[in-house]
Amino acid sequence: MQFQLNFKSGKPVYLQLVDQVKAAAASGAVRAGELLPSIRPLAERLRVNRNTVAKAYAELESQRVIETVAGKGCFIRETSSPFRKDARLKLLAEEVDQAVVQAHHLQVSKDDFLRLAEDRFDAFAQKRTRAENP
C-alpha cells in the first residue's frame, strides 16, 4: 500500500493515513486480513514520527477498520460492522454534513454535489471490481 502525504494540506498527517487506509479498504485495494506495514518502517519511509503512525493505527482500530494481533501486526478487519444500520447512517451523516458545508463554501450546487457523490461511488465500485478480478 502506497501512502501519499501532503504536509501543506492543513489536515493532520495521522488523519491522512486514516483516510487512505479507509479508502483503500473501501476500494478493495487492500483486502480483509491483509497485513499493514509495521509502524516503525512506515514512519521511517514517510519521514514522520512513529507516534503519528501509531496514532493513525489506534484511530483505525477504534473505528474497527483494522485489528492488531499481538506480536504479528495490524491487519485489515472484515467489513462486518458491529453497529446497526441506523447507527452507521448516523455516523455517515456527520461526514456528509461536513461535505455539504464544504460544497456550500465552494459554491457547488446540490445537483453537482449529488452527481459527484454518484461518480465517486462508481469509481470505488470499479476499483473494487479491478481488485477482485486482476
Image (cartoon, grey):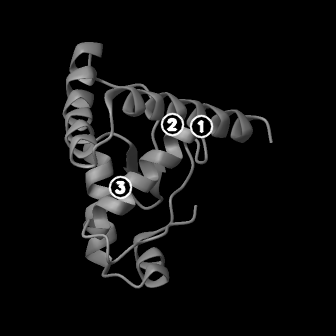
Q: Which amino acid does label 2 sit on?
A: Arg
Q: Name the residue under label 1.
A: 123
Q: Is residue 32 visible?
A: no
Along the line of sight, which residue is nearer the eye, 130 or 41? 130
Pick whichever of labels 1 and 3 is earlier in the sequence: 3
Relative image position of residue 3 (x, y in whole percent): 50, 66
| Residue 18, numbered circle | 3
Residue 34 falls left or right of residue 70: right
Q: Is mark 3 on a helix, strand or loop?
A: helix
Q: What element carries label 2?
A: helix
Q: Mark 2 points at which residue?
A: 120
Residues at marks 1 and 3 touching, judged by CB atoms closer than 8 Å: no
Q: Give the residue drawn at x 23%, y 14%.
A: 86
Along the line of sight, which residue is nearer the eye, 65 or 4? 4
Neighbour tally class for label 2: few under 14, some 14-19, many 20 plus, Cα within 10 Å: few
Residue 78 falls left or right of residue 110: right
- Relative height, residue 107 to residue 118 (above, below): below
Pick whichever of labels 3 and 2 is earlier in the sequence: 3
Q: How far apart are marks 1 and 3 (CA)?
A: 20 Å
Residues at marks 2 and 1 touching, judged by CB atoms closer than 8 Å: yes
Q: Is mark 1 on a helix, strand or loop?
A: helix
- Relative height, residue 97 to residue 24 (above, below): above
- Relative height, residue 42 to residue 31 (above, below): below
